[in-house]
Image: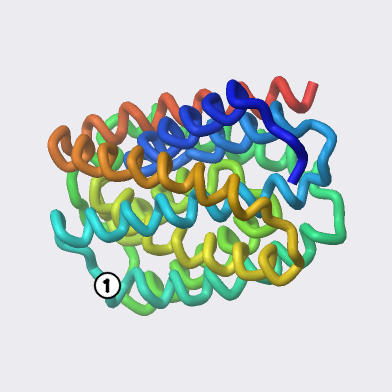
Amino acid sequence: MPEISTIQLLILLGFAFLAGLIDSIAGGGGLIQLPALLAVYPNVPIVYVLGTNKLSSSCGTLMAVYQYARKIQIEWKKVLPIAVIAGISSVGGALIATTVPNNWMRPLVLVLLTLVLAYTLFKKDLGAHEHQVPFTPRQQFLLSMFAGLVVGFYDGFFGPGTGNFLILALISIFGMDFLHASASSKIINLATNIGALTLFGLHGSIYVWLGLLMAIFNVGGNFLGVRLAVLKGSRFVRVLFIVVVTGLLIKQLIDFF
């Protein structure tokens, strides 16, 4: 692992905590933690940054899943099949990420994030409460499997905005409110993180000790974030979701131009 100063380490640990806090509520933790790693290690192969980020975020997401499962009702029969297909798909994405540059993804992500933000702002009651959707159970299953396949691959290959895309998919397909969609997305996100992390680990592309140190603070952020989300409810999660998607969109625009 390249050398790192005490100040740089403290900065990374602080960003890891903040990333866990934000990610556990509305997704988008990669918006915070990944750029921090890139700022400290601008000259190392990107795959090492991705692998270290996955180690930290996987531990934090595990804490979020544990906390949400204790505090709210999760529809496991709906979520687990998505998690399985997304986890497998993320391995394929990560495998390609170790050999193929992924900068060409930025324009596509810009378009997708813009659509997500516009749709969320336009539908002011989106995710405020659980609602009926115009899909049969079979259609819901097929749509959710497709969403898991696509988002899982994307998370392994590139990653920014994965949690946001999952939350919106769960609201649209199953009619969940923001709080339950956020909780359910963490289970799927944990599967994609573990899938990608396994591949990065086999590839030897992780700074293990740094990732574990950051994981401690990421776990702490997730612990606090879940408590805030459950206490404040879906409207709070929706507001933070909009803020995170806007921030992620601005960040991607800056990187692109």
Q: Is residue 60 above or below residue 110?
A: below
Q: Position of residue 210 (x, y in %)?
A: 59, 45
Dot 1, crowdedness within 10 Å: few (<14), some or many (≥20)? few
Secondary element under disc 1, as helix, strand or loop, is helix
Say which amino acid is labelled 1. Trp
Q: Position of residue 20 (x, y in %)?
A: 41, 40
Q: Which residue is mark 1?
A: 76
Q: Position of residue 234 (x, y in %)?
A: 21, 38
Q: Is residue 126 above or below residue 208?
A: above
At 44% from the left and 70% from the top, the residue drawn is: 83
So how many labels did they put on this image?
Answer: 1
Nearer the observer, 232 or 60: 60
At 41% from the left and 46% from the top, the residue drawn is: 216
Q: Is residue 13 above or below residue 201?
A: above
At 53% from the left and 68% from the top, the residue drawn is: 86
Q: Which quadrant holds the C terminus?
A: top right
Nearer the observer, 20 or 182: 20
Q: Quadrant of residue 89?
A: bottom right
